[in-house]
Every structure is written in structure tokens, then in C-alpha cells.
Image (cartoon, coloured by chain):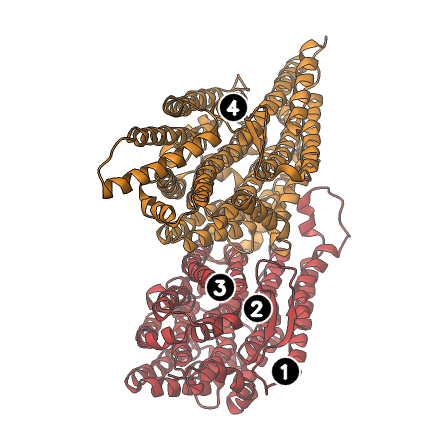
Chain colours: A orange, B red
């Protein structure tokens, strides 16, 4: 069990950081945590070879169940968590040096801030490990109690992570909001599960699925009887199934709250925007993977149990009965809820996203629309759709992690504090209120889309200020999110749409297509700001005598850039080396993955296929 | 052979990125964009595109015109999710050759105008060359969709980075219009895939889909092509994109990208959904006629030179459409021939106005120009020949193409074809008006005397004009090679 390794590593790190006499450098803890995650990843890969798993093995007395899907998703979570952790680790050092040239403190004060940052840092990675454990336990949990405990473990870790920078007002505000609404949704989950427990008396999910199926079949039998002769003796069971249905609905609403699906999405934009960028990376990706996988388990479990039962009752009359009763069955309600939420998420995520000027809010809304696609795939609930769901989940997590990495990298590069002040002074784009909002810039240096302006253009910003390759990878990421072939995002969207068309969800497929065109508009807007616009607005307006003026202007610009580079030479010398190697390495790996997925799609597609098949045929 | 054709531009990109280590003294990534002198990048890109053109000539030389099967087949079965097979037949051969011919011309024509981000420009262009050739060679509707769509991001960046004043708006229009249309096509393709289990064109052409379904699929795919062609209610992106794009982008858009919808119709709509095509032909013809007349009349009211050429392209493309959907061999061959001819003439016009004149006088507004014959005689002669091509006077290949198209359309529907034939008259109207305003009359008071065409400009224009007229005199060079392939997509009612 790889997550035992994780727990062990966590305890050792906790002990070490608590017991040791002098404070241990946060970087060391962070590296240790990343190594623990890496080792867990290797372990979990080696457990993939255990062939006796079949349809799943219950561990810890049936509280948890290990299946093929849970194992592969677990692998993926470890890998991604290790990646995110190792990248955010190296960033802290950068943000510290940002601080140092930002407020020009005395040596001592600098040291103080340094220390403060580092102490926060060690907590950060330990709590991150907690959330990973919570997430991994959640995807394997097979019992209402273990489910609730693991989701709380994950959520509490995330609440603490959100507020870990105590001196940032926005982060505290966002963390509080996250905590309150997360607590509310946990309450929903608890309410739902207690209703289920009250009316069934079992907490094991397998048993609940079985019970539901049995009551459904009995209902059908009763209905049959009521058709032929009037006997209503067993009707109490029907009532039970209704209550269980309600309980399940409430529980699902709680989960949908946590993944920020549309009617329950309002917290997401505020929270993502408020917390520091590296924490946003963690919040936006890690929490979603595990909860969505659990939702998948929920939907699948219910469906497959009915399928098994219908196989067992091999008689034709029962089967036809089941067919006839499909509208009255419990789970169509559940999947209808998912469908409605998917529809709303698609609409809200794309349409509200059009009005955003802050980059992290924009990414939050884009996440909502992607969650819409994921929920659509869950709601369809066939082999194709599950396959597309898993593929979509994997590619989306990687793409969105990459997007946040690029934001972090932009923040640690030329756009750090000095570049920021330059933009806010020279542009009337940033109004006064916006400038006020920029005060948290040490934690999330890139807040506005307009801050990315002209990053592609070397001429406009000067060689040291612009980062064209980074802008290019951001463009690739955004094109992929918009679903432009041949990038990986297209294949995911296409798979979901194919599943939808195949199973007759034409309307939702159309909605998905229209919304992805609309969302392309806001992705393109970011690309436009990065690539097309120059820092110097006049270069665009002076169009009349285009060539002659252009000559002189470029000359002026070059002079400017030379001047500024001379002035800031010392600063920039540091600035340009600030992006850490591991960060640039992960960005380039992920970008290349997005770009060239089309050349070798076999690994991801086949494993998604196998996972989907394992859910249905084992 | 096709692999070489696809990989040469990519190799060019690689060489440009790797060659040149003179000035790497900074560790910043930005420096990678400044290592070579910009002229060297231009030379490398031009060289590779010329190599590719020679490869395409060899392809043509080895092409067997007496078979309907696809030739030079290259399969890559490692790509699991679809059927990655490349092949060329009569329909695609000349589009590939047109693409390969136009790229050296693009690089030469834009040689002076692009001053910033030179490397990115060359990379985008070479990438586009590969993608366009891929669209014309794939034998799988899913791959067709992928490549059809993947030319959008490079074009978006191309227009947005190097375009003129309204470039952002133009790039957004191009991208969003096309994306919107092609997603409808994607849904149709997905439906075809799940019904038949295959995305291979040859398999799909042997499958008989039900008539009602064919109609829905046809409408979805035609909607996409309507935007790409473009036909009237959805044409607004084209004048904007063509006029705001840099010169190379305009040449590319008018020369090759406009033909993608024609190629898609000949490849997918007509052979895969034949009954629906026959059923909807009246609709197509109505839209086509409206487009011809509307676009031609609109052209007369424009003052921006590039917009004039863009609108005249819309009119010609509508005639191409009429020929392509005529379901007889004259019409379809005419549409291919007119497509090729338009691929010579409208780039030539763009180079003449958007390139030569704009570089000299820095305005695209027609009203400023008058009497250029007096100062630029060579320009006026070539401009006159290109205008004749645009009018489709006899001896130009446009004439042969237009004549065959209208002939085919006449066989389907005499009344509609005679209305459409007024397009010839209208195109003569606006072309002569356009030529007259620029070249005729006394020399404009707004202009200074500028040198005539330079050697580079002349050599860019010369092959286009020569090809346009020699193919008009002897069109069998093209027609003989496409007879067999075209006859396979005819449908017996």
C-alpha cells in the first residue's frame, strides 16, 4: 500500500520538524516530501502488477476498496502532487528574493522575512502531504464513514493551505470563504450519508448499492403484482428507496459543491483568485481529481450492481421489467442531477468567464466549464464515456497544472514586483482600484491578464523583460484548453462528445460545442494580450505613415530597452535567472506532451480504455 | 514521397532553430530568437520551400494519371486512434502543387515587409505549409478535421502578429467563425464514426447511410464549409482577414485556404453523402447565386484595395461552388481548374496592390491612386494581365475554369446558371473599374513618383501570370490528370 508509505513519511516529517532543536529549513522538508511522493509513485506503479485485484479488493475490513481505477488514479495523483510540490518549493526561494528587492529592508528585517517564509514553508509541504493522503483515501474508500473521514482530511488540509500566508489579507479572506463553504458542503455530505444510514442501516457502499437494486427489483415486482392483483404488503421498501435517493442526492450536491460545479460554483473564483498562486495550483487540481473519481465510483457502482443483479435474475420477465422500470429506477435521478449540473457548468463557466480581467478568475471559470465536460461524461455512464472521463481528467489536470506553472514562472521572471510597478504606472489599463488590489503581489505576482501584455514581443519589452517561449507555451496550453486540434485538449473533448453523441445526448453535445467556441474567445483574449499587444501602445496607433515612423520607433524602443537594461542590469541579471530549473523543466515537458500527444497517444488512451473496461467487465 | 513533402518544411524549422550559434552569450530564452540575422532566416525558409516545390514537381512527374486509386500511399499505423494514411489522387495533386508553388512566392513577396519577429514568421509559414499539405493528403475524415482545424492557431498568430491596424479583430473573426463552423463538422464526423466504426474515407464511401441521416450530416458539414468557402451570410470574416493579414497571409488565405472548403466538398460531402448532395443541390445553387451577385455588387462599393480583391474572391469561389455541386464531369473539373487559376491570379493581385503599391505609398485606399501607368509601366502591364485573369477573359485559365463550371451548372439548372453567368459580367465590371482607377487617368496629386517593379517583385509575379495564361491556352495539363479521379465522385441518379 503506497499510501502507508506516505503516512509513514508524513509522520517522520512531522516529528522531525516538531522535535528538532533548531528550525529545519523548509526547503529540506519540501524536498523530502517530494521524494516521499515520488517513492509512493514508484511503489504504486509496482503494485499495478498485482493481478489478483480483479474487480477490487477490500482492505481494512471493507472500509476501503482498491480497484484498477483507484490504483491508476493514485499513481497519477502521486506524480502530479510530487511535480506541483517540487515546483512550488523552489518558488518560495524566488518569492523571498522578490521580497528582498521589493521593500529594500535592512539586512535584519530581510532575514526575518526570510525566516518567516521558510517556517511557513515546512508546514506547507507537510499539510500538502495530508491532503494527498486524504485524496488517495477518498478514491479508494468504500464506506460512508471512511469516505467522510478522507474527504474531511483532504478538505481541512486545503483550508489550512489556503490561509497559510497569514499576513496576506486576500489569502485569509479567501481561505475563510473556502472554509465556510467547504464546511457547508461537508455538512451536506454528512446529512446525505446519515439519511442513507438511517433508512438502510448499512454504511458500506457495496451493500447500499445492493440494497438499492434489490428494492428496485422488488418495486418492479410489486408494480407487476399491482397490475395483476392488488397486494401492497411490501410497500415500505419503496419508501426506503425514495429516502435513500434523497440522501444520495444531497450527498452528491455536497460533492458537486466541492468541485465547484455550476450552481455551486460561486466560491471558486474568489478563492482561486485570493490565495497565492502556488496554493491555487494545489487547490484547483489535487482536490478535483479525487472527488471526481469518487463521483465516478458512485455512479458506476450503482449502475454495475443493478447490472449484476439483472444478470442473476436471468429470467426474461425480470429483465423486461427492469427495462420498463428504468424511469422509476433510482439512479437516473442521480444522473439527471449530474446532467443538469454539467449543462449549467458549461454555460456558466464559459459565459461568465468572458467578463473576467483577472487571470486566475479566468482560469477558475475555465475550470468550471471543464468540470461541466467531466460531469457530462460521468452522467452518460457508459464504457466510452468513462474512458473519455478518465482521459479528460488526466489531460485536464496536466494542462491546468501547466497553466499555473506558467503563471508562477511569469511571476518569478520579469513580471515580478519591478515589472509590475512599471505596468501599473505606464498603463491606464490598470485603474486605481486595481492598483489597490495589487497589494498582494508578493504572493501572486501575476493577477491581471494585462500584466502578461507583450510577453511574446522581444522588441517591446526588451530582451530581458519579455519571455517569448513562456508566452508560447501559455498559448499552447490555452489553445489546448480551447480544444484546438491537434493538441491534447481536443482529443479529450472529442472523446466526451463522441460518447455523448453515441448515447443520444445530442443537445448536451451541441451545448458543449457552442460553449467551447465561446470559451475559445476568452482564451484567445489572453493570447492576444500576450502575443499581439505591445507594451508601447503608440506603436499600434501610429499607423498612418507606417513604415517611416516604425523605423524611428523601433530605434527609440531599442534605445529604451538598452537604457532600461543598463539601468536595471543588476536587477535583471538576477531576474533572468530566477526561474528555477525544475519549473522550466516541468513546463517544457508538459507543453511538449500537450503538443505532441497526437504522435504517441497510445499510453494514455489505452490505459484509460483498460480502466473503463475494468469497471464494466471485471 | 509524401513523407518528404510533409517533413521538408518541418526540417526547415528545425534547421532555423538549431543553426546559428554565433551570439549565444545570454542565458535568457529570448536570445534564441535573435541568433541569426533575419535575412539568413528568410533565406533558409525560402530554400526549404523551394526544395519542397521541386519535390512536388517530382511527385507530379511520377503521378500515374490512368488510375483512380490514391498514389504514393504512406501508412503510419502506429497512430492508433485513426487511420493515418496519406495518398494523392487527381483531385488533391494540383492543390498540393499549388501549395508548394505559393510558399516560395510568399517568402519572396514578404521578404522586405517583415521586419520584426522574423524567425516566428518563417516558422509559422513553414508550419502552415506542412499542415496544408497534410490536409490535402490525408485519407481519413478525422485527420482531415484535425489538420483542417490546426491551421487556425498559426493563422491566428500570423494575422495577429504581423497584420495591419485592425489585425486583432481580423484574427478573432477568422478564428471564431471557422471554429464555430468546424465544430458542427466535428459532430457530424463523430456521428459517422460511431455509426460505421471507421473514419477512413474509402470505407465510408462504401457505407450506405440512411437518407434522413445523410441530410442532417450534410447540413452540419456544409455549414462548416459555408463559413470556410465563404458563402453569403457567413462571409464577413473573409474581407477582414484578407485585408488585415500581412501580404504573405493574404496570399496564403486567398490562394490555398479558400480552396480547403472546395477540396473538402469534393472529398467528403459529394462522395460520402451523395444522395443528400443531390437533394440539397438547389439550396447550394441558390446560396451560390446570391453570393455571386451580392459579393460582386459589394466589391464595387469598396475603397480598400485588399478588400476589393477579397470580395472578388468570394464571387469567384461561389462560381467554383456551383461547378463542384453540378454532379457532372465538366462542372467538377471546372471547379478544380478555377480553384487553381484563382490560386494564381488572386495572389498576384494581392502582391501587386498589397505588396508593391503598399510598400511604395503606404496606403490601401483606392482613392489616392491614379495614373500609375505614367510612372510604373511594367507594374501596369502585369496588373492588367492579372486583371484580365480576374475577369476570366479567354486564354486565361480562369476562363476555362469558369466556363466549365457554368457549363456544368447549366446542365443541372439552366435558369440558375444563366443568373450565375451574370457574375462574369459583374466581375468584368469591378475588375475594369479597379484597374482603371489605379492605372488610368492622369497621375494622382497625392502620390510621388516611385520606382517601377523591382527585380524581386517581377520574378515573384512572373510565374503566376505565366502559369495563369499558359494553363488557359493548354488546360489539358491539369484536366488530363483529373479525369479519372473526378469521374469516381459522380453519382448516378
Please state which of the two labelled residues, at mark 4 or mark 3, is closer to the viewer: 4
Tell me the element at label 1. loop
Instruction: Look at 38% across and 63% down and name the residue there.
Output: B220
Label 1 to label 4, Cα distance in Å?
69 Å
Marks 1 & 3 on one chain: yes
Residue located at (53% from left, 19% from top)? A160
Q: Gap between marks 2 and 1, in whole Å?
A: 17 Å
Dot 1 alpha-carbon crowd within 10 angstroms: few under 14, some 14 to 19, many 20 or more: some
In the figure, is residue B26 to the left or right of A591? right
Nearest to viewer (mark 1 / mark 3): 1
Q: Chain of mark 3?
A: B
Q: Which label sits in the foreground, 2 or 4?
A: 4
Residue found at x 56% / y 73%: B451
Q: Position of residue A609 (x, y in %)?
A: 57, 49
Marks 2 and 1, the one that precedes in the sequence: 1
Residue under circle 2?
B138
> How many angstroms separate mark 2 from mark 4 (CA)?
52 Å
Q: Name the subunit of mark 2.
A: B
Front residue (pair A541, B387) = B387
Amino acid at each position: 500500500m503506497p499510501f502507508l508509505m506516505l503516512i509513514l513519511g508524513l509522520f517522520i516529517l512531522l516529528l522531525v520538524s516538531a522535535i528538532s532543536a533548531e528550525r529545519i529549513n523548509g526547503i529540506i522538508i519540501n524536498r523530502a516530501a517530494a521524494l516521499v511522493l515520488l517513492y509512493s509513485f514508484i511503489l504504486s506503479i509496482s503494485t499495478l502488477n498485482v493481478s489478483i485485484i480483479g474487480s477490487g479488493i477490500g482492505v481494512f475490513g471493507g472500509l476501503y476498496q482498491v480497484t484498477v481505477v483507484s490504483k491508476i488514479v493514485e499513481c497519477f495523483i502521486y506524480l502530479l502532487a510530487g511535480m506541483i510540490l517540487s515546483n512550488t518549493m523552489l518558488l518560495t526561494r524566488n518569492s523571498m528574493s522578490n521580497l528582498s528587492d521589493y521593500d529594500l529592508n535592512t539586512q535584519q528585517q530581510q532575514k526575518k522575512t526570510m525566516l518567516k517564509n521558510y517556517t511557513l514553508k515546512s508546514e506547507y509541504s507537510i499539510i500538502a502531504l495530508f491532503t494527498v493522503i486524504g485524496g488517495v483515501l477518498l478514491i479508494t474508500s468504500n464506506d460512508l464513514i471512511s469516505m467522510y473521514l478522507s474527504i474531511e482530511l483532504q478538505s481541512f488540509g486545503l483550508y489550512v493551505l489556503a490561509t497559510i500566508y497569514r499576513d496576506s489579507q486576500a489569502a485569509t479572506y479567501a481561505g475563510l470563504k473556502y472554509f465556510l463553504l467547504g464546511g457547508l458542503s461537508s455538512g451536506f455530505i454528512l446529512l446525505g450519508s446519515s439519511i442513507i444510514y438511517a433508512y438502510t442501516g448499512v454504511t458500506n457502499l457495496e451493500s447500499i448499492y445492493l440494497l438499492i437494486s434489490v428494492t428496485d427489483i422488488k418495486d418492479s415486482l410489486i408494480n407487476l403484482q399491482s397490475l395483476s392483483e392488488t397486494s401492497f404488503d411490501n410497500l415500505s421498501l419503496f419508501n426506503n428507496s425514495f429516502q435513500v435517493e434523497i440522501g444520495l442526492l444531497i450527498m452528491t450536491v455536497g460533492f458537486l459543491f466541492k468541485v465547484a460545479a455550476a450552481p455551486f460554483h460561486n466560491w471558486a473564483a474568489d478563492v482561486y483568485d485570493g490565495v497565492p498562486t502556488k496554493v491555487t495550483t494545489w487547490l484547483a487540481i489535487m482536490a478535483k481529481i479525487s472527488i471526481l473519481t469518487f463521483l465516478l465510483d458512485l455512479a458506476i457502482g450503482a449502475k454495475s450492481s443493478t447490472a449484476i443483479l439483472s444478470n442473476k435474475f436471468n429470467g426474461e420477465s425480470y429483465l423486461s421489467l427492469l427495462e420498463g422500470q428504468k424511469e422509476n429506477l433510482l439512479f437516473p435521478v442521480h444522473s439527471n442531477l449530474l446532467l443538469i449540473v454539467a449543462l449549467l457548468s458549461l454555460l456558466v463557466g464559459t459565459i461568465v468567464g468572458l467578463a473576467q480581467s483577472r487571470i486566475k478568475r479566468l482560469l477558475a471559470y475555465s475550470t468550471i466549464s471543464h468540470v461541466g465536460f467531466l460531469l457530462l461524461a460521468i452522467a452518460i455512464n457508459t464504457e466510452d464515456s468513462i474512458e473519455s472521463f478518465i482521459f479528460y481528467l488526466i489531460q485536464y489536470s496536466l494542462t491546468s497544472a501547466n497553466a499555473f506553472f506558467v503563471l508562477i514562472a511569469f511571476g518569478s521572471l520579469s513580471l515580478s514586483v519591478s515589472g509590475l510597478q512599471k505596468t501599473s504606472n505606464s498603463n491606464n489599463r490598470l485603474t486605481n482600484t486595481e492598483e489597490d488590489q495589487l497589494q498582494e503581489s508578493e504572493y501572486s505576482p501575476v493577477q491581471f491578464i494585462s500584466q502578461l501584455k507583450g510577453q511574446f514581443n522581444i522588441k517591446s519589452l526588451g530582451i530581458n523583460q519579455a519571455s517569448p517561449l513562456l508566452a508560447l507555451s501559455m498559448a499552447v496550453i490555452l489553445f489546448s484548453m480551447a480544444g484546438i486540434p491537434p493538441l491534447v485538449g481536443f482529443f479529450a473533448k472529442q472523446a466526451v462528445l463522441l460518447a455523448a453523441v453515441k448515447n443520444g445526448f445530442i443537445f448536451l453535445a451541441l451545448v458543449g460545442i457552442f460553449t467551447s467556441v465561446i470559451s475559445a474567445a476568452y482564451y484567445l483574449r489572453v493570447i492576444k494580450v500576450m502575443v499581439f499587444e505591445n507594451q508601447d501602445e503608440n506603436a499600434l496607433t501610429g499607423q498612418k505613415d507606417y513604415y517611416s515612423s516604425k523605423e524611428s520607433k523601433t530605434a527609440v524602443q531599442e534605445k529604451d530597452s538598452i537604457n532600461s537594461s543598463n539601468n536595471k542590469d543588476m536587477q535583471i541579471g538576477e531576474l533572468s535567472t530566477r526561474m528555477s530549473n525544475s519549473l522550466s523543466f516541468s513546463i517544457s515537458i508538459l507543453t511538449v506532451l500537450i503538443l505532441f500527444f497526437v504522435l504517441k497517444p497510445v499510453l494514455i488512451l489505452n490505459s484509460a480504455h483498460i480502466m473503463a473496461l475494468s469497471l464494466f467487465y471485471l | 514521397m509524401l513523407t518528404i513533402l510533409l517533413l521538408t518544411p518541418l526540417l526547415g524549422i528545425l534547421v532555423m532553430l538549431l543553426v546559428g550559434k554565433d551570439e549565444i552569450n545570454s542565458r535568457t530564452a529570448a536570445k534564441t530568437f535573435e541568433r541569426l540575422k533575419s535575412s539568413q532566416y528568410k533565406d533558409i525558409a525560402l530554400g526549404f520551400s523551394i526544395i519542397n516545390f521541386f519535390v512536388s514537381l517530382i511527385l507530379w512527374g511520377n503521378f500515374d494519371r490512368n488510375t483512380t486509386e490514391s498514389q504514393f500511399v504512406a501508412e503510419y499505423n502506429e497512430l492508433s486512434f485513426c487511420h493515418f494514411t496519406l495518398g494523392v489522387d487527381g483531385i488533391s495533386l494540383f492543390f498540393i502543387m499549388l501549395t508548394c508553388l505559393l510558399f516560395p512566392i510568399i517568402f519572396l513577396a514578404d521578404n522586405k515587409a517583415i521586419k520584426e519577429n522574423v524567425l516566428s514568421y518563417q516558422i509559422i509559414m513553414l508550419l502552415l505549409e506542412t499542415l496544408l499539405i497534410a490536409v490535402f493528403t490525408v485519407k481519413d475524415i478525422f485527420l482531415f478535421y484535425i489538420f483542417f482545424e490546426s491551421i487556425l492557431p498559426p493563422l491566428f498568430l500570423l494575422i495577429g502578429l504581423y497584420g495591419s491596424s485592425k489585425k486583432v479583430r481580423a484574427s478573432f473573426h477568422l478564428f471564431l467563425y471557422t471554429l464555430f463552423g468546424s465544430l458542427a463538422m466535428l459532430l457530424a464526423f463523430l456521428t459517422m464514426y460511431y455509426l460505421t466504426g471507421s473514419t477512413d474515407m474509402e470505407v465510408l464511401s462504401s457505407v450506405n447511410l440512411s437518407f434522413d441521416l445523410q441530410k442532417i450530416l450534410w447540413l452540419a458539414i456544409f455549414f462548416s464549409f459555408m463559413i470556410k468557402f465563404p458563402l453569403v451570410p457567413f462571409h464577413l470574416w473573409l474581407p477582414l482577414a484578407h485585408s488585415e493579414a500581412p501580404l504573405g497571409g493574404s496570399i496564403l488565405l486567398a490562394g490555398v485556404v479558400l480552396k480547403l472548403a472546395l477540396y473538402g466538398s469534393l472529398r467528403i460531402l459529394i462522395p460520402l453523402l451523395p444522395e443528400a448532395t443531390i437533394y440539397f443541390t438547389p439550396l447550394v445553387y441558390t446560396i451560390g447565386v446570391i453570393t455571386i451577385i451580392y459579393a460582386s455588387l459589394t466589391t464595387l462599393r469598396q475603397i480598400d484595395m485588399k478588400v476589393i480583391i477579397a470580395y472578388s474572391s468570394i464571387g469567384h469561389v461561389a462560381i467554383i461552388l456551383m461547378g463542384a455541386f453540378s454532379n457532372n464531369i465538366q462542372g467538377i473539373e471546372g471547379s478544380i481548374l478555377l480553384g487553381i487559376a484563382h490560386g494564381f491570379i488572386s495572389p498576384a493581385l494581392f502582391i501587386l496592390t498589397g505588396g508593391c503599391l503598399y510598400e511604395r505609398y503606404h496606403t490601401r485606399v483606392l482613392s489616392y491612386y491614379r495614373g500609375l501607368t505614367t510612372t510604373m509601366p511594367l507594374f501596369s502591364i502585369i496588373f492588367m494581365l492579372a486583371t484580365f485573369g480576374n475577369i476570366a477573359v479567354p486564354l486565361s485559365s480562369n476562363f476555362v475554369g469558369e466556363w466549365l463550371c457554368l457549363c456544368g451548372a447549366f446542365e443541372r439548372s439552366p435558369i440558375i446558371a444563366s443568373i450565375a453567368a451574370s457574375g462574369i459580367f459583374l466581375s468584368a465590371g469591378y475588375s475594369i473599374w479597379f484597374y482603371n482607377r489605379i492605372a488610368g487617368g492622369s497621375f494622382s496629386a497625392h502620390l510621388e513618383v516611385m520606382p517601377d517593379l523591382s527585380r524581386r517583385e517581377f520574378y515573384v509575379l512572373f510565374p503566376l501570370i505565366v502559369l495563369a495564361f499558359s494553363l488557359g491556352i493548354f488546360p489539358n495539363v491539369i484536366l488530363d490528370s483529373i479525369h479519372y479521379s473526378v469521374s469516381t465522385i459522380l453519382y448516378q441518379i
